[in-house]
Amino acid sequence: MPKAYPAYFGAYGKFSMIRSFVDGFDNLFLIGRNGMHRYNNQDHSMITAMTAVENIVRGISSKENIWQVEQRGAMKISIQVPRIKMDLMMAMGSYLILGAILLNFYQYQINPDGISYISIAQKYLRGDYGNAVNGYWSPLFSWLLMPFLLLGCLPYIQRNFFLLG
């Protein structure tokens, strides 16, 4: 229903009957302003949506936790981090620790791809966007290198690049 807006005229006191009926459908999750017929803020609407998605993913058909999301101060509600995110964080932490250990062994080695990314980052820093953007090299890695180049944190690589180029 386009542009529907919760209004509390007359029979809102009987809303619990409607809620009980609708909650009987296992695959129907009412969320946000229009679905829950509540005058709430955007934070509340988003949190009810995220809670509904968590219920669907976990196979939970009860809607009680959705209806328990507070209307005021919705930002105070904490959302549990799924196990997948925790595993990802552990993998990333292990990767960073291993990278820090191996840095001493490989800090002075650079391959042609690395030289190209540094060259592209330098072009971005000079404002030469026409030559920096190309169809072969992704810009993300060059963008990540730019702060290090600005701070002068890659002097050995820069020196080798200028000697080669």
Image: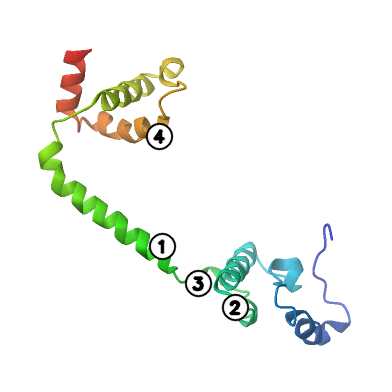
Q: Which residue in the protein does label 4 denote? A: 140
Answer left or right for 118 relative to 73. left
Q: Which residue in the protein does label 1 denote? A: 85
Residue at 56 percent across and 69 percent down: it is: 57
Between label 3 and label 4, give the one nearer the viewer. Answer: 4
Residue at 58 percent across and 66 percent down: it is: 50
Element class at badge 2 = loop
Element class at badge 1 = helix
- Amino acid type of the residue that numbered disc 3 sits on in the rendered structure: Lys
Q: Which residue in the protein does label 2 denote? A: 60
Q: CA distance from mark 3 to mark 1?
A: 21 Å
Between label 3 and label 1, give the one nearer the viewer. Answer: 1
In the rendered structure, which disc, 4 or 1, sits on the residue that comes first in sequence? Answer: 1
Q: Which residue in the protein does label 3 denote? A: 76
Element class at badge 3 = helix
Q: CA distance from mark 2 to mark 3?
A: 23 Å
Where 96 sits versus 38, above or below? above
Q: Quadrant of the C terminus?
A: top left
Q: Position of residue 31 (x, y in %)?
A: 69, 69
Answer left or right for 22 relative to 76. right
In the rendered structure, which disc, 2 or 4, sits on the residue that comes first in sequence? Answer: 2
Q: Count residues near mark 4 (Cα–Cα under 10 Å), then give few for <14, some for 14-19, many for 20+.
A: few
Q: Count residues near mark 2 (Cα–Cα under 10 Å), then give few for <14, some for 14-19, many for 20+.
A: few
* Displayed quadrant of residue 15: bottom right
Q: Count residues near mark 1 (Cα–Cα under 10 Å), then give few for <14, some for 14-19, many for 20+.
A: few
Residue at 79 percent across and 83 percent down: it is: 21
